[in-house]
Image: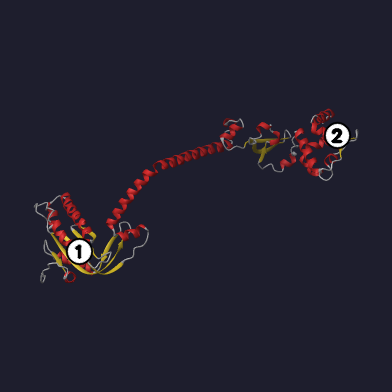
Amino acid sequence: MKWNDIYWIFQTFLTNQKLKNWACKFLWSEPGVPVCPTALLGKDHAGTWLGALSCLEKVGHFFPFKCSLQNQSLLNAIMRTIEKLLSHPPPPPPPESIRKFINSQFVLKTRREMVPLASQHQSMLKLRGSMVWMESLGCMVYLCSPKLRSLQELEERGLHISDIAQHDTTRDLILLNQQRLAEMELSNQLERKKAHTSLLLCPILSRHLEAEKKKTETLLYAMLPRHVANQLKEGKRVEAGEFQVCTILFSDVVTFTNICAACEPIQIVNMLNSMYSKFDRLTSVHDVYKVETIGDAYMVVGGVPIPADSHAEGVANFALGMRIAAREVTNPITGQPIQIRVGLHTGPVLAGVVGDKMPRYCLFGDTVNTASRMESHGVPDHIHLSPFTYSALEDKRFDILERGEIR
């Protein structure tokens, strides 16, 4: 450093009015006496300030003042002002220190205080790379690339993607991150559009959902007893129950096998659909539960799943209604009204839900088998009762005739 440089530095110092006041108040001149930096910084804190302001070491040897300042906070403020005025970066580490970490990655960042005030709000430029020692030239070469994550950061620093070498992984990382950001933005747009659409369609969807819910409940109640269906809707397990007394009815179409052999399948379907629709309406009238239909067989029960004292009376009235309804359905072959056989039996049963995919409410026990036998041994267009059902209906104002022995 030359003396004229030092003179210029001090001339710069003294153009600042605060420094002029500081020099006049706290410094006294002793021309011709060289001083060390400790005289300027103070004995107690010389080591700290020498490390932080190493750029002042060269100046300290020629500094023509001595310091007699005891106010540490004011001294700190003065030294920060001097550092900004000098604007000299600290000396770089010696090559020997760098060569110890030659295999490490070095990241250099722009010092914010060195950047113009108008640009200090922006993020500082970072360089990432490795140091290479050039033995022939006796110097250290820093091979680096900008440490960036997106095209926006690239544009903020006045760079372009073409400024980064094709073999540099930073180029690939920026492009991949840009693609990820584009996908995230697209996903956010879809979510916002979906939320907006949901708000618009919410009332309409609620009405449609309620309508579909009612349809589902209607179908479920048609397949299962209402209280059983409600338990399944709530996710509860439906336990099997034993009923001490109930009345079961079976019916079938007379000469149904011959009708199927002589008719088209669609004619059979139409005939059964017409007949079963009439029977289904009667179940609500007489408060009996339709268990199932298998082919031309129709099965109902009274007193299950809800016990009732009038179970036999309800099933008997239903059987009489079946005879009348069946006469309204014609035989596809003869065009005459079809005839049905009906059998009834009263006794205990075990009832429960069977299956998961298509659950059915089924009845088990000898009462079911006996009721089926009463139907199969019955007479066309008649209702066949077992003695147990007769006992349950004896005082219910029904006209019942004894059939006699069956062979």
Residue 151, image x, y percentages: 56, 34
Does the rendering let one see residue 160? Answer: yes
State yes or no: discs 1 and 2 in contact (Cβ < 8 Å).
no
Label drawn at residue 315: 1
Amino acid type of disc 1? Val
Q: Which residue is mark 2?
A: 24
Amino acid type of disc 2? Cys
The span from disc 1 to disc 2 (Cα, nearest Å) is 122 Å
Q: Name above or below for residue 105 compared with residue 116.
A: below
Identified at 17% across, 50% down, the residue is 270
Identified at 19% across, 63% down, the residue is 250
Which quarter shows the N terminus? top right
Residue 343, image x, y percentages: 16, 65
Total number of numbered labels?
Answer: 2
Residue 94, image x, y percentages: 75, 39
Identified at 83% across, 46% down, the residue is 44
Q: Secondary structure at mark 1?
A: helix
Residue 69, image x, y percentages: 84, 41
Label drawn at residue 34: none
Report the front residue among 217 and 115. 217
Which quarter shows the C terminus? bottom left
Q: Name above or below for residue 41 compared with residue 267.
A: above
Q: Secondary structure at mark 2?
A: helix
- Binning the other alpha carbons within 10 Å of mark 2 as few (below 14), some (14 to 19) or many (20 upward) gives few
Left or right placement of residue 187 versus residue 139 in this view: left
- Binning the other alpha carbons within 10 Å of mark 1 as few (below 14), some (14 to 19) or many (20 upward) gives many
